[in-house]
Amino acid sequence: MEMVDALSFSGDIAELEGRLDEAHKILSDSIPIADALGDPVLSSEAALELAEIALEQGHSAEARQYIQQGFKYLGGHKDPDDQIAANILLAKAALAEGNTRQATEAVNTAQAFLSQSPDWEGHVLFAITNSRLQLANSKFTSARDSIRSVIAETTRQGNVRYQLEARLA
């Protein structure tokens, strides 16, 4: 398990530093190891990270494949944080393709898990993605107010990564 965690963290660092190809390779290499260890949660998290990288590179179809792989690994595992992450990524992919109906369904599914999750990050990612959906649905005022709230919270928390993501939304 420690090897997979180390690979996952290395992939996360490479992604945050903008070395997306390297992050992709590291995370791709971690999935067979997690599979061999019989840990579907680690496999799912790696697949979802790969989906995030594909979205950052503008490859929504590839992202969807990784998201589906992540859902497959999750199977009956109903960890709210993983379910939120997977559905937020699905909403982002749908928005990238202009499919607001599917994005709405994914956001609604993610929202259903929010009350079960104490994870601050999931709530912030949900708020950012929901703001993007509101913007896509021409709800400019509510999107602006939501993003302002996220920026204020991420500033209070000192989280530069999500401040930037919110400002780019």
Image (spheres, helix red, strand yellow):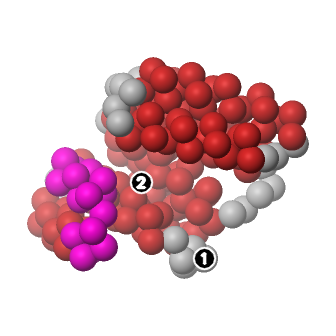
Q: Is residue 44 left or right of residue 62?
A: right
Q: Secondary structure at mark 2?
A: helix
From this view, report whether residue 24 is shown above or below residue 47.
Answer: above
Q: Position of residue 91 (x, y in %)?
A: 43, 47
Residue 137 visible to an observer of this rendering: no
Q: Is residue 89 left or right of residue 154?
A: right
From this view, report whether residue 86 is shown above or below residue 15.
Answer: below
Asked if residue 111 is among those painted magenta in the image, a careful observer would answer no
Mark 2 crowdedness (10 Å alpha carbons): few <14, some 14-19, many ≥20: some
Q: Which residue is mark 1?
A: 116
Q: Position of residue 32 (x, y in %)?
A: 77, 28
- The residue range painted magenta reads 153-169
Q: Residue at x 35, y 25 (%)?
A: 58
Q: Residue at x 30, y 57 (%)?
A: 162
From this view, report whether residue 10 is shown above or below residue 153.
Answer: above
Mark 1 crowdedness (10 Å alpha carbons): few <14, some 14-19, many ≥20: few
Q: Residue at x 24, y 76 (%)?
A: 156
Which circle's residue, 1 or 2, is located before the other in the chain? 2
Q: Amino acid at mark 1?
A: Gln
Residue 33 visible to an observer of this rendering: yes
Q: Which residue is mark 2?
A: 104
Q: Amino acid at mark 2?
A: Thr
